[in-house]
Amino acid sequence: MSAPKKVVVFGTGFVGRMVIPEILKHPSFELVGVGVSSEGGKAGCDVGELCGIDPIGMAATADIDELIALAPDALVHYGPTAAQANVNIAQMGAFLRAGIDVCSTAMTPWVWPQMRLNPPSWIDPITEACEAGGSSCFTTGIDPGFANDLFPLTLMGLCSEVRSVRALEILDYINYEGDYEVEMGIGMPPDFEPLLANNDILAMSWGGTVPMMAHAIGVELDEMTSTWESWVTPTPITTAKGVIEAGNVAAIRFTINGIIGGEARISLEHVNRVGTDAAPEWPRGNQDDVYRVVIEGTPSITQETAFRFTDGTGRDASTAGCLATGMRALNAVPYVNDLPAGWVTALDLPLIPGVGTVR
């Protein structure tokens, strides 16, 4: 086994707090620094304590220059979403200009930087930073990300003909504590207009892998369309965030469709409900909380993937999926290091087998 890759992690939010303890015991990686926002009082705190483990003798810092001076092989960035695009671009751009590769789960529209809905102000600074530093930038996620790029594209490679491919997220948000009211309208009255019900916002936020898949298989999309449905609960539902009152939205379902020849040939679909009884007529997995790929073709293929913890900690499926997302970015580091400078997508990476995971 080659020498461990030295990594700086930025972000001790939900994903970062889970991944950092895994790095500490991983033979393929060495944690040399941890970055945090200047807000929230985390700077100066022991990283172990921030992650809910014993102190490790390393203090988190908000000083980007201090982290760059550590000369890591890569920055693994678990920063905020594209809602804070300028902050993410400034942080990642500083490392890239210093010649340090970046693997990130923030800015998920970057899973396919060529997507026309990505504004130039989000793309040009990173392109320029990669050129200046001779560095590479890779963004991944679970959805958008490997659940609807790596998984379906791998399965499509088993077919002689594909009439349609659908990648679905089917999740229960009963224990989810993140934001979904304004974005999805969950917990809101049915006449509320959520941000993601707008076709362009939805396609930019979640649709990057649709044109990516089209590009990968050599076809042109005529257009991208979307559908949006909501389901109103007749009874109150108690969630990790509080109570969704009767008469409010407790499930949403949307699709993002890549249209070819007037038909939806490449589609993403979300079925996000709060409580297992919500929207009973909408699709379900063979298990709760799954990612599913459905290919109609020769042959037709259905794959269902469930993320679970079986270590007795009681952590839920959503948490397991978040850890998988974080580990995809981390495990990509050695392979991104070997690629030419510039943007990196899932199409540029070889198989990432998880070296060092069996130990």
Image: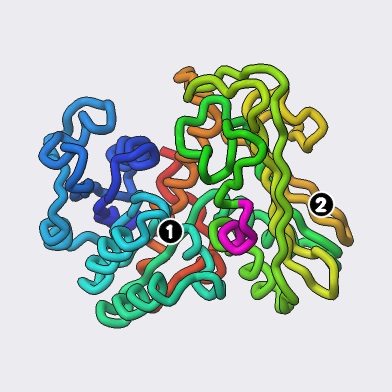
Q: Position of residue 202 (x, y in %)?
A: 60, 57
In this orientation, does residue 4 appear? yes
- In the image, which residues are magenta? 197-203
- Sequence-wise first label, 2 or 1: 1
| Residue 290 seen | no
Which residue is depicted at the point 17% across and 29% down?
A: 55
Q: Is residue 134 magenta?
A: no
- Residue at 37 percent of width and 60 percent of height: 85
Q: Is residue 201 magenta?
A: yes
Specify the quadrant that holds the C terminus.
top left
Mark 2: secondary structure: strand
Answer with the quarter of the image where residue 289 lies: top right
Residue behind mark 2: 301
Observer-nearest of 250 and 214: 250
Mark 2 to mark 1 CA distance (whole Å): 31 Å
Say which amino acid is labelled 2: Ile
Mark closer to the observer (2, 1): 1
